[in-house]
Image: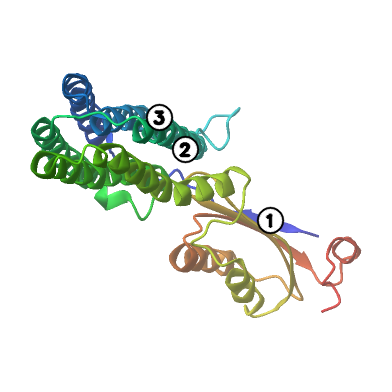
Amino acid sequence: MNREVAHHHHHARPDYNRAFAAGVALNLVFVVIEAVFGILSNSLALLTDAGHNLSDVLGLLLAWGAAALAAKRPSTRRTYGYSRATIIASLFSGLLLMGAVGAIGWEAFNRLLEPAAPAGETIMIVAAIGVVINTATALLFLSGKDSDLNIRGAFLHMAADAAVSLGVVASGALILFFGFGWIDPLISLVIAAVIFLSTWGLLRDSLNLAVDAVPRNVDPEAVRAYLMALPGVRAIHDLHIWPMSTTDTALTAHMVMDVFPANDRFLEQIAAVLQERFAIKHPTIQLERHDSEVVCRQAEHCAE
């Protein structure tokens, strides 16, 4: 006879609505400023950064929408709710940025072949405004960057933008004081490299979560070792660990035992340790007797 006990909660999520609203508004205004002055000053670096900031606004909107969907409670049809929307948003955000890298690199390469003379002073002033705006926006997402891949994506976008704007300030200074017109497309190539490097990790992690890989912060072998070390456990089989969202992780496992525990305290302790030690918030453990013929057919480690 099998005995199954599940552990599920609807966990409250940090509210980043104000952070998203402020980030979108500030960056939309800055995109317009950069685009106008980029055209007036003939600066590819400013136009490049404007395009990148626009893609970041779209990324922020994606992340904001996903966070809003993830906050909705599960239903009888969508039993996990809309939590996976955060994974989808992170994936699309990464793909969007990779597309921007290609466009920026191509335009910068063409400008290197046919350099123009942009206005260095204008570039410096506009880019300096960008440093302030992007840094302020990044700080809005600082608290959640290590616990939520969706928020991490928003933080990385803004932090990279701040660094990029600093690079554009340097470009303007070199053009203003030394007349190096070729430095403008070169800085654009550096911008493309920064975006690529900051996006690669986000895209890799998003792809892994999208195909239900074990999250990077969970060691599956350590989880198995913990479960196997519990008193009375003979074997663990069909152990599955997967992301429900960018913040929540689920686990299912079949636990083969000689004798079932007298009450649910044993399972409650397992759930508490899995959450505290491995950040697994949704474990489901199915208990099975060691002498069950069904177990012996299902579990390859039955004889252990």
Going by the numbered disc 3, the residue's amino acid type is: Leu
- Can residue 247 be seen here? no
Label 3 Cα neighbours within 10 Å, binned few <14 / some 14-19 / many ≥20: many
Residue 157 occupies which quadrant of the picture? Answer: top left
The residue drawn where x is 58% and y is 42% is 210
Which quadrant: the N terminus?
bottom right
Instruction: Name the quarter where the C terminus is drawn.
Output: bottom right
Q: Residues within 10 Å of mark 2 (few under 14, many from 20)?
A: some
- Kindly report the distance in space between the C-alpha atoms of the residues bearing marks 2 and 3: 16 Å
Task: Name the residue beneath numbered marker 2.
Answer: 98
Residue at horizontal 37 percent and vertical 44 percent from the top: 195
The residue indicated by pointer 1 is 4
Please state the horizontal and vertical placement of residue 280, each as a whole percent of the image: 51, 58
Identify the residue under disc 3: 62
Say whether disc 1 or disc 3 marks the residue closer to the N-terminus: 1
Frontmost residue, 95 versus 228: 95
Q: Do the residues labelled 2 and 1 touch (CB within 8 Å)?
A: no
Residue at figure coordinates x 32%, y 27% from the top left? 51
Picture coordinates of residue 26 (x, y %)? 18, 29
